[in-house]
Amino acid sequence: MTVRVEVVERILRANDALAAEVRALLDGAGITAINLIGSPGSGKTSLLERTAALLHPRIRLGVIEGDIATTRDAERVARCGIPAVQIETRLVGNACHLDASMVRAALGRLPLAEVQVLFIENVGNLVCPAAYDVGEHLRVVVASVPEGDDKVYKYPSTFARADAVVLNKVDLVPVTEFSLEAFTAGLREVTAAPLFPISARTGEGLAGWIAWIEARHAGQAGDAARSAATTGQGPTVADGTRTG
Ligand SMILES: Nc1nc2c(ncn2[C@@H]2O[C@H](COP(=O)(O)OP(=O)(O)OP(=O)(O)O)[C@@H](O)[C@H]2O)c(=O)[nH]1
Ligand SMILES: [Mg+2]
């Protein structure tokens, strides 16, 4: 037992070190990275399609898609005019989550100089992705109405680590037993992070989500500029070339 725990801790420590490298690389390129975590089918890709239509290219988006198999989600996002790369984890041991090494490799396939906000859509799973820092600046959990209003109570640590929570498919509230009050009460037991009840189908509620991304990206860009001024270094892109 002890051996197993030590091995897991070593894996997570190695991942954390790589994640810090990824974050430094993204900071240098002036990119804000947002890790999207949620159950299969909660609407992560649908949210990205809506977000692309409302935000790109005013803020230039890029996407890393994580799935066990297929390039379907990267193709959906690419059809919105967004640079997108797919990680298929069946090619790297069928992992049920993304890790920092996968994201670092995927960054080399993206035109980073054209990206301001990078979304990393994790493998559909409400449990395992929460344990892995992939080098993101912000973490967003995408839950959805058909999953039920008890999800925060049952998976508290995933929600506790979120910087924001999107509750998707609110168009289905009238045909389910879902209670927004019960969901919100559970969420407030573990975090004060903002909650965006939205429908990626109808577009309801998206204005607040878009404003949050814009504000957080502006804050992140300000932090990176201040840090560059302190160190006397301009931002750099993936190959280490200075851009400013
Ligand atoms: N009613 C309703 N359906 C939605 C909404 N958003 C997404 N869907 C549907 O939910 C299903 C799953 O949506 P996706 O966006 O593929 O979900 P995902 O989280 O990316 O799924 P994985 O990548 O497989 O984990 C699709 O059939 C969507 O059309 C919504 O707001 N309302
Ligand atoms: Mg998806």
Image (tube, rainbow, N blue to C red):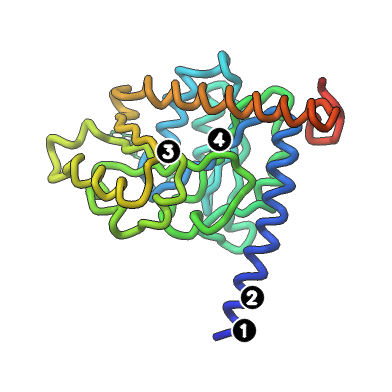
What's under tag 1, amino acid-wise?
A: Val
Whichever of labels 4 and 1 marks the residue nearer the N terminus, that label is 1
204 left or right, relative to 163: left
**Marks 4 and 3: CB-CB under 8 Å?**
no
Q: Residue furthest top?
A: 58
Numbered disc 4: secondary structure: strand
Image quadrant where residue 236 sits = top right
Q: Nearer the viewer, residue 60 or 159?
A: 159
Residue 185: percent from left, percent from top: 24, 46
Q: CA distance from mark 2 to mark 4?
A: 30 Å
Horizontal side of 204 relative to 177 (left or right) equals: right
Quarter of the figure with the N terminus: bottom right
Residue under pointer 3: 164
Density class for disc 3 (Cα within 10 Å; few <14, some 14-19, many ≥20) is: many
Going from the N terminus, do you reach mark 2 or mark 4 first?
2
Secondary structure beneath label 3: strand
Give the residue pinned by disc 1.
Answer: 3
**Which residue type carries mark 2?**
Val
Q: Which mark lies nearer to you, 4 or 3?
A: 3
Confirm or deny contact between disc 1 and disc 2 (CB under 8 A): yes
Instruction: State the separation of the CA atoms marked 4 and 3.
Output: 14 Å
Ligand 1: image quarter: top left
Residue matched to label 2: 7
Q: Are marks 4 and 1 in contact (CB under 8 Å)?
A: no
Residue carrying label 4: 119
Per the rendering, the mark at residue 189 is none
